[in-house]
Image (spheres, grey):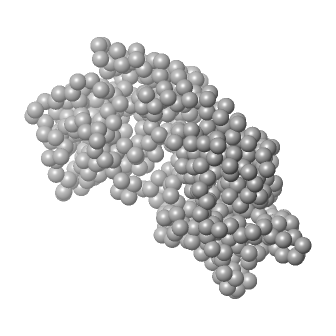
């Protein structure tokens, strides 16, 4: 569980700041995780994330209620007893496959945001890397191997029956104290590790086996390793929680949840039932901030037989077209893909689903433009991080009346997107945030000479608009697609049948 227990360490172990990181390419490092590789010494936030993703607010509430007992056991009995309480409360009855999915799609983002700079400096400098942790191995192995380059991960093993976790642990139990030393000897045999990193007395047994050992003192104010220093960028991640839930933040989330849900219902009702011309003001009164930059074009005059304007948006949530309509003060039709039936029913604007058949979709988009303005998100799926996915080029072939729109949003408690969960709750989760922000940036209309009418290919037009939107947001262009996202987060290609909704990814980022 991590620990706010009194900290004192053996003076013979120097602090990690004194460890050189040059010339260690052929050496082996063995490191603890919580409080060593990670700045935070408590693993409670990560158990809370797992609990929320497995069983929603009720399972997280169960964990929060059990946390005081875990703390008492930790302080007055043993670290093992405290961690066992957290493991049982979090995992009992859960599908092992669901735990693995969360560990792959959700936890790496939170772990990477808490990486200790000095420990990472030493750990990354060594050619062979081993991690020991009292945390269940199933929670940490994906992050450690895929994103930190760990060769060996040894952690507590959870037991299961029929594919469901029992909440108990396998022999030899929770990996603390001498059990870590035994695990090192079993994994490395007679080889003596070159460097050992730990942060508490229960790490001393394995640290004494190493040629050099360094202790990581508690430094809660040290800045985490920046995203630019990670071996791979985290472009995709899933999960509903925005911030790592400390015990206090988890309690606040639990107390806010019923209030937030009622507020979300009110906000959704206002957006769905009120005239679009006054939705902006209704949102303002209900705590939803909408910032509008740039000048949107006027509504297309149907009587002049002109094609409607095609708004090309970056894709942050399924609400992008609705907030664009809010910004222009009139409903703008949208083409969609993989939107839940609930979202379609609640939508205050006309939504038309794509078929993924190029000829049919092209004909449908042309007919919609003849009726008026239209909004498309050519990325095909959302991305939470400051990246833009590859733009589908079909839209560029159909009109030269194109206005790029850069969308940005801020959420303080819940994410309004999901790849693994039920998409019907996306709008509710977004509006459950106490004061969510949507920023709608209207950019200059694309000059005709830079469209297909002006002789450009559809891919050139799509790439140009991607770069323009990315530049306005200070985002980075990538070649990732919907398929890449869903393979990383959900283990499928994101292809859906009918209306059902169909990472952490390898390093595939390219410059704009």
Q: Which of 98 and 25 lies nearest the eye of the viewer?
A: 98
| Residue 115 visible in this rendered orientation of the protein | yes
Residue 424 point in image, percent of width and height: 71, 40
**Which residue is drawn at the image coordinates 28% and 29% (left, top)?**
180
Residue 237 point in image, percent of width and height: 53, 47
Q: How many marks?
A: 0
Residue 75's image quarter?
top left
Residue 36 point in image, percent of width and height: 28, 38
**Which residue is drawn at the image coordinates 52% and 42% (left, top)?**
412
Q: Which of 472 and 173 lies nearest the eye of the viewer?
A: 472
**Which residue is drawn at the image coordinates 36% and 19% (left, top)?**
71
Note whether 284 is above or below 296 in the view shown.
Answer: above
Residue 191's image quarter?
top left
Q: Is residue 263 left or right of residue 363?
A: left
Residue 232 point in image, percent of width and height: 42, 56
Note whether 165 is above or below 187 in the view shown.
Answer: above
Q: Quadrant of the N terminus?
A: top left
**Which residue is drawn at the image coordinates 35% and 56% (left, top)?**
229
Note whether 134 is above or below 75 in the view shown.
Answer: below
Q: Is residue 336 left or right of residue 143?
A: right
* Residue sticking out furthest to the right: 303
| Residue 131 visible in this rendered orientation of the protein | no
Q: Which of 33 and 455 lies nearest the eye of the viewer?
A: 455
* Residue sticking out furthest to the left: 12
């Amino acid at each position: 569980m991590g620990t706010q227990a009194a900290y004192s360490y053996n003076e013979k172990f120097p602090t990690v700041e004194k460890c050189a990181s040059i010339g260690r390419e052929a050496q082996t490092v063995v490191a603890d995780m919580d409080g060593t590789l990670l700045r935070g010494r408590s693993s409670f936030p990560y158990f809370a994330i797992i609990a929320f993703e497995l069983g929603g607010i009720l399972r997280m509430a169960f964990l929060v209620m059990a946390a005081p007992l875990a703390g008492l056991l930790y302080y007055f009995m043993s670290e093992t007893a405290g961690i066992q309480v957290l493991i049982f409360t979090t995992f009992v009855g859960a599908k092992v496959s669901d735990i693995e999915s969360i560990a792959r799609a959700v936890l790496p983002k939170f772990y990477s945001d808490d990486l200790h700079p000095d420990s990472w400096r030493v750990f990354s400098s060594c050619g062979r890397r081993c991690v020991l942790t009292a945390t269940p191995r199933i929670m940490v192995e994906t992050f450690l191997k895929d994103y930190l380059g760990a060769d060996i991960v040894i952690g507590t093993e959870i037991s299961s029956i029929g594919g469901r976790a029992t909440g108990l642990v396998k022999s030899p139990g929770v990996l603390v104290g001498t059990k870590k030393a035994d695990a090192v000897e079993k994994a490395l045999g007679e080889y003596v590790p070159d460097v050992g990193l730990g942060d508490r007395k229960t790490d001393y047994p394995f640290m004494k086996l190493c040629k050099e050992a360094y202790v990581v003192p508690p430094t809660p104010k040290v800045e985490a390793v920046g995203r630019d220093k990670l071996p791979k960028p985290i472009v995709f991640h899933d999960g509903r929680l925005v911030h790592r839930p400390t015990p206090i933040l988890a309690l606040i989330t639990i107390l806010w949840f019923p209030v937030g849900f009622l507020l979300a219902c009110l906000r959704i009702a206002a957006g769905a039932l009120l005239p679009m011309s006054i939705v902006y003001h209704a949102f303002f009164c209900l705590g939803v901030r909408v910032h509008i930059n740039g000048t949107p074009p006027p509504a297309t005059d149907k009587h002049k037989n002109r094609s409607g304007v095609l708004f090309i948006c970056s894709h942050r949530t399924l609400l992008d077209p609705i907030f664009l309509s809010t910004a222009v003060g009139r409903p703008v039709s949208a083409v969609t893909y993989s939107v839940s039936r609930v979202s379609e029913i609640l939508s205050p604007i006309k939504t038309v689903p794509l078929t993924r058949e190029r000829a049919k979709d092209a004909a449908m988009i042309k007919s919609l433009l003849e009726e008026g303005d239209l909004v498309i998100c050519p990325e095909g799926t959302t991305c939470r991080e400051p990246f833009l996915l590859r733009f589908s080029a079909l839209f560029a072939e159909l009109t030269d009346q194109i206005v790029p729109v850069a969308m940005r949003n801020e959420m303080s408690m819940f994410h309004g997107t999901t790849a693994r969960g039920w998409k019907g709750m996306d709008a509710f989760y977004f509006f459950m945030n106490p004061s969510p922000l949507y920023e709608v940036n209207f950019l200059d209309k694309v000059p005709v000479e830079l469209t297909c009418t002006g002789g450009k290919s559809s891919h050139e037009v799509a790439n140009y608009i991607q770069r323009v939107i990315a530049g306005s947001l200070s985002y980075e262009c990538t070649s990732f697609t919907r398929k890449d996202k869903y393979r990383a987060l959900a283990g499928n290609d994101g292809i859906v049948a009918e209306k059902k909704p169909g990472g952490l990814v390898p390093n595939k980022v390219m410059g704009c």
